[in-house]
Amino acid sequence: MHELGSILFLMAAATLRTATPLILCAMGGLFSEKSGIIDVGLEGKMLMAAFFAAATASLTGSPWAGVGAAIVASEVLALLHGFACIVHRGNQVVSGVALNILAAGLTVVLGNAWFKQGGQTPSLSHSQRLMPLVFPNAGDSILVYVALLSVPFTWWLVSRTRFGLRLRAVGEMPLAVDAAGISVTWLRFRAVLLCGFFAGLAGSYISIAQNAGFSRDMTAGQGFIALAAIIFGKWRPVPAFGACLMFGLLDAVAIRLQGLKVPGIGEVPVQLFQALPYLLTMFLLAGFIGRAVAPKAIGVPYTKEH
Amino acid sequence: MSTSRRPLPVWADIILLPLINIALAFIVVGIIVEIIGVDPFQALGLLVTGAVGSSESIGYTLYYATNFIFTGLAVSVAFHAGLFNIGGEGQAYIGGLGCGLAILAFDRFLPAWLLVPIAIAAAALFGAAWAAVPAWLQASRGSHIVITTIMFNFVASALMVYLMVNVLIAPGSMTPQSRGFAPSAALPVLLGSTLNLSIALALACCVAVWIFLWHTSWGYALRTMGHNPAAAVYAGTNLKRMTMLAMCLSGALAGLVSVNELMGVQHRILLDFQAGYGFAGIAVALMGRSHPLGVVLAALLFGALQQGGAELSFDIPGITREMVVVIQGLVILFSGALEHLPRPWLQAVLARRP
Amino acid sequence: MQVLKPGGLANEGAAIELRSIDKSFGAVHAVRDVSMRIDAGRITGIVGENGAGKSTLMSILYGLYRADAGEILVGGAPLQMDSPRDAIAHGIGMVHQHFMLIDSFTVLENLVLGAEGGPLLAGGMAAARAELERLGREYGLWVDPDALVADLSVGEQQRVEILKVLFRGARILVLDEPSAVLTPQETEQLFRILTTLKERGVTVVLITHKLREIMATTDQVYVMRQGAIVASRATRDTNPEELAELMVGRKVLTRLDKAPARHGEVVLRTDHLSLVDARGVTLLQDIGLEVRAGEIVGIAGVSGNGQTELLQILSGIRTPSAGTVEVGGRVFDSAHPATPAEMRALGLAHVPEDRLRQGMVGAFSASETAILGYHEDAPFTNNYLLDGPAVGEHCADLMQRFDVRPRAPGLRSSSFSGGNQQKLVLAREMDQAPKVLLVGQPTRGVDIGAIEFIHRELVKSRDAGCAVLVVSVELEEILSLADRILVMFAGRIVGEVAPAEANERQLGLMMAGAQAAA
């Protein structure tokens, strides 16, 4: 009985650990997508943030400096994305892809130039990392709690505030927002910056809380899983949070089952669990599990005639 | 957007603007190189020598360019149909599975003249099939192809890891790779490098795509759909079928990467042989304005960067090969998302001329 | 034309003065040196054809565009209008032709957008609810605050737009073509609302190209043509004929001279045709019509009463839910739907309502546009290969015969003027000597000269034995073109009239669903 309890606890903790960057990233992406700016570049922002968090923590010895640097790095990419998509009305998907590739290259180039460890940062000591707060074996660093709080915060901001109303409006019909005398550009920039902030937190969690340093491509598609979670949650904060938890659970189960032989089936293919978030999202998108309706103006640059 | 200035002349739009965009990307890279403490001009010199300094390095450059032509064409064909195929990565990967499976199945008893076409067809077929699923989801279920092709990249990756580790791994091998192909499956090598005959296939594909898009009724219908789907419906085009056709063609072209990589160089199936080429195809297509000729030119540039970058990283330890990835990202940024950045400035300059 | 007193004296009673407003978009001189005075507490009309510059002028007034030159005075004080925010701050509100409403929001959410009354929604929403109630009482404009905009009728949506403007405290209300999307009854209702607003001291500016509305509601009217004000009148001192002449700059369309139709056999027939969309809304109901060779059948109706969907079904673009379509002896129904390609093969040609969106590809050259839909046919295509020279020659030939200018087959289709685009599309469709010709809004966005040309070509086609079905929202056009007139309302054909016996009033009533066929 006691053993079962502890297994459940560890599973829950593992789920939450893997879900934390997804939740942070999804909440950030939600702001961007709600405002009508597709963010395929969550992955790149998170990767860049992870690198700068670890690099700064390693150089300064302070994890908080790392978090700060991560947010700045992520915001720089967010601003680039905004500059391309909002100011210059560039293709949002192209911009996101570009930033992902840029981040994948730049983190290794800079890492190699600064630390000469093949793109990795030096291993971080405990004092350079964000360590568990309450349960040492559960990995509940402060960012886990921040992630949990980010969900009601996002919900509140989107549904109960002036900013949220305008945010939802600009994703549906930017022209109406403009006609109401509200700046579409500034509104979308704020959304993109919020996205950068949360993606920055997500990235720093990965490299200085969950792990002890940066290694190349360490985000390994989690930005895309977060994107999938947003879609799975039909662009609503609480369901998106649910999707993050589900994807986190899938991952935790996959790790548990690794190498395990099930009678009659043989070894459980871990890769199936890795592919499941994507497959499930595709099922959803195909309309097999309800319908996901994106904000109407998503992906469409706002052009104002002058 | 209406501007008070005249639109750019065609030559400026298709030649000058892309060149400026590339130049901007290189300026940014130069700054990054400077930041990590290397003289950008020295680096550029080494890069150029590394890319075209000897016949061997030219061979490598062309070998890389071959991959870029395939994925660049893949993205271009989809672009013309108004579809954004980000799944070139996965389609190339699964194309490799098809190519490899065909060879592993037949290389012990089929002669080269039969085996090679079958393997090429299998590569194209598997690549097309992997693109067909997102295409079908978009055509019939309305799922957005950008999202589904991204997702399918990851699914392809998971599938390949599973197959390589559990099924296709050569008996007794410690690394996840298949047994080696029989020599009959190898394409002839050129210029004493990894360059092989698949470059001829790539160039043939360019010509074929050009004829298809601009000189056939199907290509006409495909471009109509890309520019104006309502007009395509009006004209009697079945959008679902045309979406499937465009994506399958796109996937097939991406799948051919494996002909160069597996039949030309590796002679076995292995993990991540396609890594990065699918995404780079987006940069190639954007820079080449989705025209086969432009794609060839852009692919040559990227091939040179890839080869020159590799040489550069040998000569200067501070620089890694990923510098090329940075350049790719910047090229996509500047010639894709920020393509309009220099336009007003260029318009002003050209308007001032007598 | 200078219509206000010079010298910059602040006129009492002038809500707005525009002085020498000028605006160009690229090479298009949209507004030329416009000066006007809008009296407080009255209804001022601005009338002009599509493209005369009315909407651009009002967008400048509302801060959406910035004028290249000129001055705007509100209440006597010159103002800089940089954004709608400035206009709103000075009591100017605008009801746009295309509603600025967010479908997935409630009425209340739409109302407060941009005027939320604080960073948190709760307080502002409660206050807005009370204010909405008050406005409803005062102006007779009641709408359910918690209804989703998507669920409202078009007339109700427009009321929300007006409420939005009043909610922001506007005392000057600008309406851009407000009746374009309304049924006649809804239009009547709108005019009653405008009169009430006037009685309560609100200044109203009504932009329209419909003279009846100007005559019915306004106190004062400005006529715009090609970006300039060409006349101003007190409404009671003018009449529709004079305004029409001023608008177009010459006598309006003369009635088309045409011989009586020689009816042949029925080549297009529908029976009990119905269409229900995915949401369960009935768009077409029990449509039965026949078109004979050698006649022009006109379908009249306010736009949005099913005409678009009817054309889509007849041309094979959309599948009906029930009923049959018969073309040249072949019968299609929902189980065996036609495709556009099949219809075309049967000799049915289709000039779509929206040529830019459907009838052509803007980015294609004119010669490529000139084979759209026929691109798989000889001589353009042989064995799947396009014959470039043949395609080019074909286009040059069409341009010659239909007087498309400039005669440049290689030019981008979108670079041609509206009239020339329409001629190109018409040429393409008529060139095939079709048995059936469907024409949607033949002269929308087309200048007067081209209108007459297009009308004559349609009659020529009829005389050559083609069965022509014309859908138009312009009553005059239907009256002059058609040999028989069918009136559509709410997805049904509510009556048939012979043009000789028809008058606009009777047709108008039928279009409003008020009266079945006499």
Image: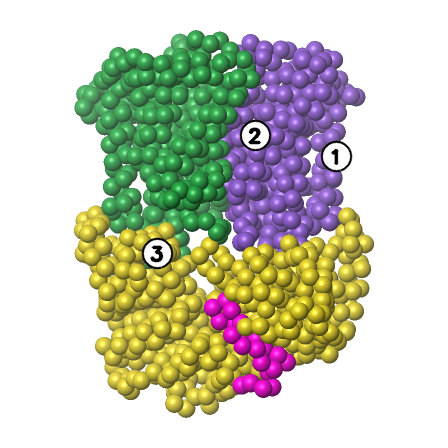
Chain colours: A purple, B green, C yellow
What span is colored magenta in the figure? C216-239
Disc 3: CA contacts within 10 A as few (<14), some (14-19) or many (>=20): many
- Residue C60 is a magenta residue: no
On what subunit does the disc labeled 2 rest?
Answer: A
Relative to C433, residue C241 above or below: below
Q: Position of residue B206 (x, y in %)?
A: 28, 34
Label 3 sits on a secondary structure element that is helix
Q: At 70% from the left edge and 11% from the top edge, which residue is drawn?
A: A125
Nearer mark to the viewer, of 2 and 3: 3
Relative to C316, residue C490 above or below: below
Asked if residue C305 can be seen in this view, the reply is no
> Residue B167 falls in which quadrant of the image?
top left
- Of mark 2 and mark 1, the one earlier in the sequence is 2
Q: Which residue is mark 2?
A: A43
> Residue B9 falls in which quadrant of the image?
top left
Question: Which amino acid does the dot numbered 3 rest on?
Answer: Ser
Q: Which residue is mark 3?
A: C413
Q: Which residue is mark 1?
A: A149
Q: Are marks 3 and 1 in contact (CB under 8 Å)?
A: no
Question: Which amino acid does the dot numbered 2 rest on?
Answer: Glu
Disc 2: CA contacts within 10 A as few (<14), some (14-19) or many (>=20): many
Relative to B330, residue C47 above or below: below
Mark pair 2, 3: CA separation: 41 Å
On what subunit does the disc labeled 1 rest?
Answer: A
